[in-house]
Image (cartoon, helix red, strand yellow):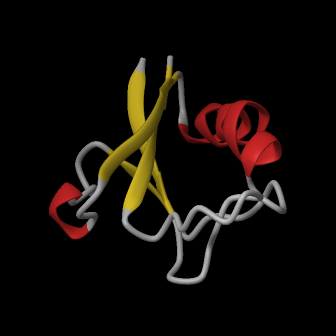
Amino acid sequence: MATYYFTFGQSHCQIDGTPMKDYWVRIDAEDFGSARQKFVEQFSSQFMEREDKLAFQYDDEDFKPDYFSKGEYAFYA
């Protein structure tokens, strides 16, 4: 199992208008592709205007949490 982080662009908002630019969503999954699928199924298809609404996907090694001042928005195992 590995950990992946999904971040959002400056203008990305949830359906209810919540800005997501300073948050990340953390996903535990077997691999990069499984993490993306879980992100779409459990988060973006539920809360974002489009299921592909994200900026970047990072693995544990490349993620820099200091860039996202509001921290983790959600976690899915």
Say if 67 sits above or below 10 in the image: above
Question: Residue 36 falls in which quadrant of the image?
Answer: top right
In the image, what residue occupies the spot 71% across and 64% down? 53
Q: Is residue 27 visible?
A: no
Residue 32 horizontal/vertical position (percent): 55, 41
Residue 69 horizontal/vertical position (percent): 23, 63
Q: Is residue 11 left or right of residue 57?
A: right
Q: Is residue 8 left or right of residue 53?
A: left
Say if 32 sits above or below 3 in the image: below
Residue extending furthest bottom?
Answer: 11
Say if 71 sits above or below 69 in the image: above
Residue extending furthest front?
Answer: 16
Q: Is residue 64 left or right of residue 35?
A: left
Q: Is residue 10 left or right of residue 44?
A: left
In the image, what residue occupies the spot 40% across and 57% down? 23
Q: Is residue 39 visible?
A: yes
How many marks do you count on the picture?
0
In the image, what residue occupies the spot 45% across and 71% down? 21
Residue 65 horizontal/vertical position (percent): 21, 56
Please identify the quadrant where the N terminus is shown.
Answer: top left
